[in-house]
Structures are given as C-alpha cells and as structure tokens.
Image: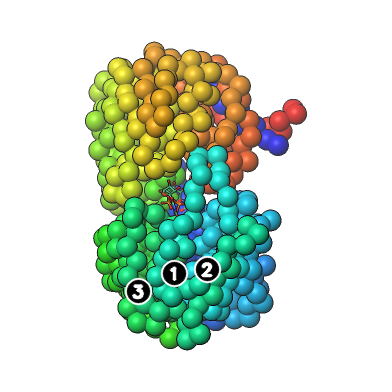
Amino acid sequence: MDSIIVTGGGPLRGTIPIAGAKNACLTLMPATLLSDEPLTLTNAPRLSDIRTMTQLLESLGAEVAKLSDGLVLSMSSHALNGARADYDIVRKMRASILVLGPLLARQGQAVVSLPGGCAIGARPVDLHLKAFEAMGAELDLRDGYVHAKAPSGGLKGGVVDFPFVSVGATENALMAATLAKGTTVLKNAAQEPEIVDLAQCLQAMGAQISGEGTDTIEVQGVDRLHGATHRVVTDRIELGTYMLAPLVAGGEVTCTGGKRSLLEAFCAKIEAAGAEIVETDAGLTVRRANGPIRAVDVETEPFPGFPTDLQAQMMALLCTAEGTSVLEEKIFENRFMHAPELVRMGATIEVHGGTATVTGVPKLKGAPVMATDLRASVSLILAALAAEGETRVGRVYHLDRGYEHVVAKLSGVGAQIERVKEDD
Ligand code: EPU
C-alpha cells in the first residue's frame, strides 16, 4: 500500500492537463453492451475504476482493447456470454450497477449483484429498479442479487418519474430506454454533463433521444444500435480539484481542457471566496484575486448546483479562509469523513449531521492522515500543499480510482509531492 508525502510550500505555477471524466467513462463503457458493433471511446482516463469496469465487461463476454496508452478504449460486445455481474466485481465499484439497464435491454434479462453501502452513505439502487419496472421488467431480489427479466417482446417504453434526482438511475434508465419499444419519458432526470455526454454517445450509436441536459428526457426506442466513436467529456471534478490548488497554495495554474460551463456554480463560489478565473480556448486559469481567501457557505446539490464531489476539496480551501464557512452536504449522508483528518492538520471544523462549520485558521500543519474515500483523499493532498511541514496521506489506493498521475500533475506545477511504499 502506498502513501503520498506532501511538503507544504507554494506558490504553484504552470499547467495541468485535465483528463476525461471518470464518471462519464463509467457509464459510457456499459453502453457497449447495447450493440453488437464496436464502440470506441477516446480521451478515456487511466484509472483503477476503469480497469474494474473493463473486468466486469470482459466477464460478460465483451472485448475491451486499450490503445494509445489507455487513452482509447475499443470495445465490442458482439458475443456476450452471459448476463450475470458477480458480487466479486460489483462490490469493488458501485457503478457496476450500470450494466443492468443495457443487459436487460439487449438480452432481455440480467442478474446483477446489489452493490451494498459504501464509505459515503447507504446508496441504495431502488430508483434504478423502479425505472426498469416502469418499462415492464420483472424484478426479484434474491441472495444479494437483482434478477431482472424483460417482457417477452422486450422492454416497453414508459413514464419514469424519479422522486429525487439520481445520476446513476437516470443513466441506467436512459440506456435501457434506447432499445425499449415505444417512447420513454424520464421526469426529474439528472442534468449532469455526464448525462449529456452519455446521451450524445447513444445518439451517435443511433438512439433517438431529446431533452438531455434538462429535467425531462424523452427516448424513442429503436430496434438496434450501431457502432460509434465518442470522445469522453472533460472531468469537471478533476478540473475543480486542480482549480483549488493555486487558491490553497498561491500562484497561478491553467487547467487545460477546462470549461466554465461544466462548473458554473463552483466557479461562482470560488470567485466569491476570492478567486480570479480567466477562460480561454486552452482552458481555465486560476489565481487568487488581490487579497486573502474569504469564508463562503456551500450547499451541495445536483447539477447545475455545487457538486458533492467537490465538497471535500472546497472544505480544504476554507480551512484557512478568513471567517467561518458553513458547508451543507445534501446528497450523501456520510460525506464528512475528511473533516476529522483535516482537524488533525490543525483545522477548526465542527460537524453536526449534514452540516460542517469551518472556522478559518491562519495555517494548517502537516500530519499523518488517512484517506477514507476518493474525494476525501484529494482534499487532504490539497490541504497539505500549503500546510507547514510534511503530510503523509495513507491509503492512497482510493485516489487511484479517480485521479490519474496526481503526483506528476502537481509536481509539474511546483508542488513537493512524492509517492512512497507505506512501509518505506
Ligand atoms: N439514491 C437512492 N436510490 C437510488 C439511487 C440513488 O436513494 O436508487 C440516493 C443516493 O444514495 C444519494 C442520492 O440518491 O444519496 C444521489 O445519488 P446518485 O444516484 O445521483 O449518485 P450515483 O449515481 O450513485 C454518481 C457519481 C458520484 C457522485 C453522485 C452525485 C458515478 C460513478 N458516481 O453516483 O461520484 O457523487 O453521482 O453527483 O457517476 C465520486 O466520483 O467520487 C462519486 C461518488
């Protein structure tokens, strides 16, 4: 098991290239199951979650070739050998549930392990299942697995009215609806850029979809989908993470490939905290506007609101802001695991339920800390960039799930950061 050691300093200067989005790629990959023709994804991120999804697709009989050092995924599902996603793979990654919709739509049946809870909350999949029921599927939960069966003529279009917004359930239902008979309407659908990206890929495969990026998506089912090549959208969470680095440590960083439209609410919030953002064709350049970082209140919301996946990193910034900030986590019930670790570094944070109150201190101090999930890990690295002395972040395998080449990207802009074996 590796650790990352960061010696605080600053300022940071230079350019960080932003990869393709993990959470887009994890839903684009299962889309290959919808067609017997090849689907090629370019701009894929090189991450352990992508390797897990590769394993899962291969276990179902799909072929996945990694080209151009993993930046291109060439997939083919012409000869699926099964429709069963085993617990051994699903337990590693909740996004595995995203094979259920495509399998059900193309094969008429699927058996997929229930993912179970995870470090950030219980995370049930009831909304995914309700959507398939609305399309006529019969579902049976047995031995920790969902056994799903489409009606004899295949899934039928229907109206799916989500009681609250779910990114994964919208993606799963959208994929299934492309091959359902008739029209499916997804109401209260998620509007995240990853949904729009999925819809665009499915459209390139021949799907009839309208309304993506709004809260109502309409899908006219087609008999079959064909092959396509699609470029994965920029990872807005990696983008937001690195935009915070020069605000924490000082300096100026350009995130290439970044677009403000992917992160409007986040950009407005960091500007209120004292950031200056310049958008060019190349990407987004960020530095502190004249003056210190100031406290701001943050509430996480589905897109276009402030993303829950940037809450931990924003907290790292606010630990040394002037004043008191209140962060409300509205998406996941247990997503403040980074707070006690930041406190070990000298932060003043009080957590009550879904609310964290952060009172800025002049400086954090390096300490040994432990990563508990992906976004928590990177928030500790951000905090360490300007902390006094050395911070050792343990359990960084969480980080490998969502950030490629984090050491190279941050050392490239002048951070003192290295990866070591934990028993070094
Ligand atoms: N929920 C239910 N029932 C469901 C589905 C969701 O109760 O059937 C609840 C969840 O427990 C949560 C809320 O609804 O409280 C929203 O969950 P959502 O379904 O939107 O999340 P997800 O699809 O499981 C994706 C991302 C997460 C990101 C969330 C919210 C992927 C692979 N994961 O998860 O990303 O936080 O949307 O934006 O796309 C991360 O990358 O670190 C990460 C956790």
Pointer 3 residue: 158
Report the residue marked by disc 2: 139
Residue at the extreme right of the image, as rendered: 423
Q: How far apart are marks 1 and 3 (CA)?
A: 9 Å
Q: Which mark is residue 133?
A: 1
Question: Residue 186 appears in which quarter of the rendering?
Answer: bottom left
Which kind of residue does numbered mark 3 sit on?
Gly
Mark toward the start of the polypeptide (2 vs 1): 1
SS assignment at label 3: loop
Amino acid type of the residue that numbered disc 2 sits on in the rendered structure: Leu
- Looking at the image, residue 321 lies above or below residue 239: above
Q: What element carries label 1?
A: helix
Residue 294 against residue 104 in the figure, above or below: above
Q: Which residue is drawn at 31% across and 36% down?
A: 299
Position in image of residue 121 (x %, y %): 50, 41
Residue located at (45% from left, 69% from top): 132
> In the rendered image, is residue 324 in sight?
yes
Q: In this view, does 223 lie above or below 404?
A: below
Left or right placement of residue 268 versus residue 25 in this view: left
Foreground residue among 93 and 369: 93
In this rendering, position of residue 128 left or right of residue 318: right
